[in-house]
Image (cartoon, rainbow, N blue to C red):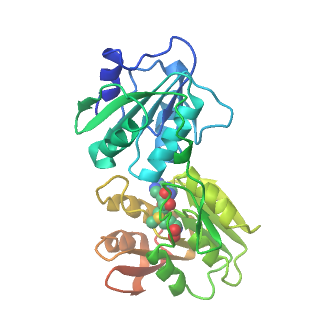
Amino acid sequence: MSQRLSLAVQSGDFAIPETGRIAVFFPREGHDLSALPLGQVEIIQPMKPDHDVWAARGYSCVPEAGTGARFEASVVFIPRAKRLARHLLAQAVAITDGPVLVDGAKTDGIDSLLKELKARTVPTAAVSKAHGKAFCIDGGLDLSDWLAEPQSVAAEFVTAPGVFSADGIDPASEQLAASLPAKLGSTVADLGAGWGYLSAQILTRAGVSELHLVEADHDALTCAQRNVGDPRAEFHWADARSWGSKASLDTVVMNPPFHSGRAAEPALGQAFIANAARLLKPSGQLWMVANRHLPYETSLAEAFVAVEEAGGDNRFKILHASRPRRGR
Ligand SMILES: C[S@@+](CC[C@H](N)C(=O)[O-])C[C@H]1O[C@@H](n2cnc3c(N)ncnc32)[C@H](O)[C@@H]1O
């Protein structure tokens, strides 16, 4: 990814404090943090796979900005979701005593954010490179009206800015929930559980004694903990491609993610399928929903003895697979 941060440091626009902590919001795997002294950096990254990459590189990492923490400087890598971008900026300026560097791609809305900020303060001249911009604003600026409150969905649920399907129930998950059989067995996992809609429906099925909600986005999982207040639910902040359960499961239910950036990435869902097969008992069942155009059938046939399309419409397909193959 671009070196806008390094350029802003070299030009003197972003002055790195000699001591004190620097908060870095939402860096992704390819971001270049080499201009920052590793020992001063605290990374705030709620997505587990990205969080683990930075932790493995030796950085101090947390999933969310702690209350009461203060920083001498901050860097905010702007996410695409506008409400979340504004929320992070409001958080960053509130906990930072020095400069806040804002970095983002044009496709993630950095230009409109800069325009909105110019109406409220005087940002430094922007470094423009690699289809994006970086500029600084002062910590302490009051952006409290950009802090996003949890949002109510369908009266009984709450969501947070930036989580999957924050504005309402996902129609694909709704179709999958309606297609689930009356009995799912005793031990079940929801891979990529999001803010918990599907899990709440799973818990209405008879006989479920244990439901594992596995979700990479810490913000979504925090919502799920509020939305699924049931003692049978266990919450795991984990990568569903590699998460392991203590004992084999009767059923996996999932609406897997199909992109991590802008482009479709069916490999993500394919890795979910492979892990679902590993997690299940020999008699285990997988129920999933996918956009109709996504190529999951080959992965399903490689991982399961029996695969059928169990419903859907012109947008989605409900897939049911049983009897995971062993020794793959
Ligand atoms: C299509 S959404 C489904 C969410 C939820 N089940 C629902 O029905 O609303 C997929 C979810 O997978 C999560 N996710 C993405 N990558 C993941 C990973 N590697 N491990 C676990 N969850 C992941 C996303 O954050 C998102 O919440």
**Is residue 35 something one can see in this rendering?**
yes
**Is residue 327 something one can see in this rendering?**
no
Q: Who's the residue at 43% across and 78% down the image?
A: 305
Can you tell which quarter of the image residue 11 is in?
top left
The percent coordinates of residue 94 (x first, y second) are 58, 34
Of the 4 image quadrants, the one containing the N terminus is: top left
Q: Who's the residue at 29% across and 29% down the image?
A: 126
- Which residue, as the protein is rendered here, is positioned at the far right? 231
Q: Does 19 appear above or below 263?
A: above
Of the 4 image quadrants, the one containing the C terminus is: bottom left
Can you tell which quarter of the image residue 4 is in?
top left
Depth order, front residue of 97/311: 97
As drawn, is 135 to the left or to the right of 49?
Answer: left
As drawn, is 315 to the left or to the right of 36?
Answer: left
Q: Who's the residue at 50% across and 57% down the image?
A: 163
Depth order, front residue of 191/32: 32
Q: Who's the residue at 50% across and 14% down the image?
A: 17
The percent coordinates of residue 105 (x first, y second) are 30, 42
The percent coordinates of residue 245 (x first, y second) are 62, 59
Q: Does 301 appear above or below 240?
A: below
Can you tell which quarter of the image residue 264 is in?
bottom left
Q: Does 309 appear above or below 41?
A: below
The percent coordinates of residue 327 (x first, y second) are 46, 63
- Which residue, as the protein is rendered here, is positioned at the far front? 119
